[in-house]
Structure formats: structure tokens, C-alpha cells
Amino acid sequence: MTTAEALLMEIMKGKHRLFQLEQQLREIQLQCQHDFQEEQTHRICRKCKRMESLHY
Ligand SMILES: [Zn+2]
């Protein structure tokens, strides 16, 4: 296997892992009883880190 092939395989594995982590986070955010902290341009939940823009 060439170095490029090995790198591509690692990248694919990383992307798959990233997708799994994003799914896990989404599930947590769906079930969260949000506790939002207001910022200037957005608000963010203290517990699950869900971010919502305050721009209309
Ligand atoms: Zn939350």
C-alpha cells in the first residue's frame, strides 16, 4: 500500500468516526432540556452546547 492510500484510508476512518460523534451529539441535543446562555449574536445551551443564532 502506498503512503497516499494509507492516508486516504485514515481519512475515511476519521470521517466515519466524525459522523458517529455528530450523531451522538445530535441525540444528546434532541433529548436535552436546554439551559441557554445568551451571547451577543447567538445563544448556547450550557448542557449540550447546542447553538442558536439570534439573527432574524
Ligand atoms: Zn441543551
Image (tube, helix red, strand yellow):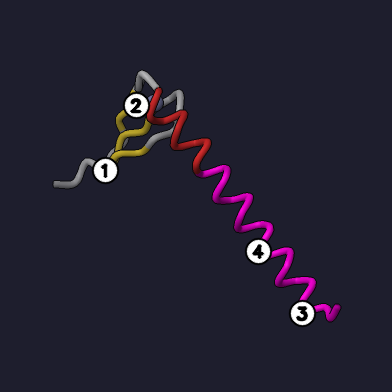
Work out whether residue 51 or residue 12 is closer to the camera in this orientation and state it: 12
Residues at badges 1 and 3 in contact (C-beta under 8 Å)? Answer: no
| Residue under numbered circle 2 | 37
Q: Is residue 4 magenta?
A: yes
> Residue 35: x percent and y percent?
35, 20
On whether ligand 1 comes within 8 Å of the CB at mark 4, the answer is no
Q: Splitting the image into 4 quarters, where does residue 12 fall? A: bottom right
| Residue under numbered circle 3 | 4
| Residue under numbered circle 4 | 12
Q: Residue at x 50, y 36 (%)?
A: 25
Residue 8 in the image: above or below residue 47: below
Q: Name the quadrant where ligand 1 sits.
A: top left
Which sits earlier in the primary sequence, circle 4 or circle 1? Answer: 4
Could you tell me which secondary element the residue under label 1 belongs to?
strand
Categorize mark 2 by other alpha carbons within 10 Å: few (<14), some (14-19), many (20+).
few
Work out whether residue 44 or residue 11 is closer to the camera in this orientation and state it: 11
Q: For this view, does 56 lie left or right of residue 21?
A: left
Separation of marks 4 and 1 at Cα, in angstroms: 31 Å
Q: Which residues are magenta?
A: 1-22
Under mark 4, the amino acid is: Met
> Residue 30: x percent and y percent?
38, 29
Could you tell me which secondary element the residue under label 2 belongs to?
strand
Which sits earlier in the primary sequence, circle 2 or circle 4? Answer: 4
> Residue 31: x percent and y percent?
40, 23
Separation of marks 1 and 3 at Cα, in angstroms: 40 Å
Residue at the left extreme of this rendering: 56
| Residue under numbered circle 1 | 53
Under mark 3, the amino acid is: Ala
Q: For this view, does 43 lie left or right of residue 7?
A: left
Prevalent SS, magenta region: helix
Which sits earlier in the primary sequence, circle 4 or circle 3? Answer: 3
Could you tell me which secondary element the residue under label 3 belongs to?
helix
